[in-house]
Image (cartoon, rainbow, N blue to C red):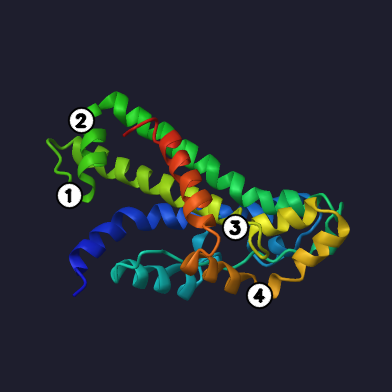
Amino acid sequence: MPDIVSFLHRLSVEALPLVLAITFHEAAHGYVALKKGDPTAKMLGRVTLNPLAHIDPIGTILLPAFLILTGSPFLFGWAKPVPVNFRLLRDQKRDPIYVASAGVATNLALAAASGVLIRIIGFIDPAAIQQAFFQGLSAQPDDSFQMVLIPVALMCMASIKWNVLLAIFNLIPVPPLDGGRIAVGLLPYGPSQALASVERYGMLIIIALFMFDPFGIIRGIIYPVMNLLFSIFLGGLP
């Protein structure tokens, strides 16, 4: 039977970092598209840091919550995709790469900022960081100051996790993920068109890839890269 109390405790720590990671990711796409000549996202109210504009009730809230609550070995979800009219971009070959890269770059920047904040907390109170890392949600503050520092540290760790996950997941070179759009922009015309043609099946391919990992890509490449970035942004914590 799912532990509702533990789920709500985890939700209180992880929900805000996840929402911010998604919001900044999607807003970054719209902002760069606007700067490159496409006002579509701006006109539809998607160049905003208001999370309500980017959250998909099923893909962002219900499905991830269900997977967490049921102890699923993998987590999956999505936000509302930012609409981009690529025909309005000034450079049809180069600008889509910038638009697609914006979300990934933003997530990595947020992970780095969270890592800096963890270092600041560690400088102020090393014990708070140690408790947050080794005890996680069960950490017990020793004083009123740690009642603030430990939850903030846990949220920073969650921020690093979610932002790294979003960045690396979106770099998988399968459209409609950002990595797929980047690959379409970088490849020569023939391979580029061939890759673009699989977009209608892209999410099915991604789901199958994570469920079955037929070529060992997830275990051999994706997870090791994620773990490396976790270690870097956490500042070498064990």
Q: Please identify, in this view, whether the residue under mark 1 or under mark 4 is nearer the observer.
A: 4
Q: Could you classify mark 3 by the number of other residues whose Cα lies within 10 Å: few (under 14), some (14-19), or many (20 or more)?
A: many
Q: Residue at x 23, y 34 (%)?
A: 130
Is residue 36 depicted above or below 211 in this figure? Answer: above
Amino acid carrying label 3: it is Glu
Q: Disc 3 versus disc 2: distance between alpha carbons?
A: 36 Å
Q: Earlier in the sequence, mark 1 or mark 4?
A: 1
Q: Is residue 187 left or right of residue 220?
A: right
Which label belongs to residue 201? 4
Instruction: Report helix, strand or loop for mark 2.
Output: helix
Residue behind mark 1: 138
* Residue to which mark 3 is pinned: 26
Q: Which mark is residue 127?
A: 2
x and y percentages locating residue 75 in the rendered image: 42, 64
Element at label 1: helix
Query: Which image quarter holds the N terminus?
Result: bottom left
Give the x, y percent position of residue 22. Answer: 51, 57
Front: mark 3 or 2: 2
Q: CA distance from mark 1 to mark 3?
A: 33 Å
Residue drawn at (46%, 75%) of the image = 58
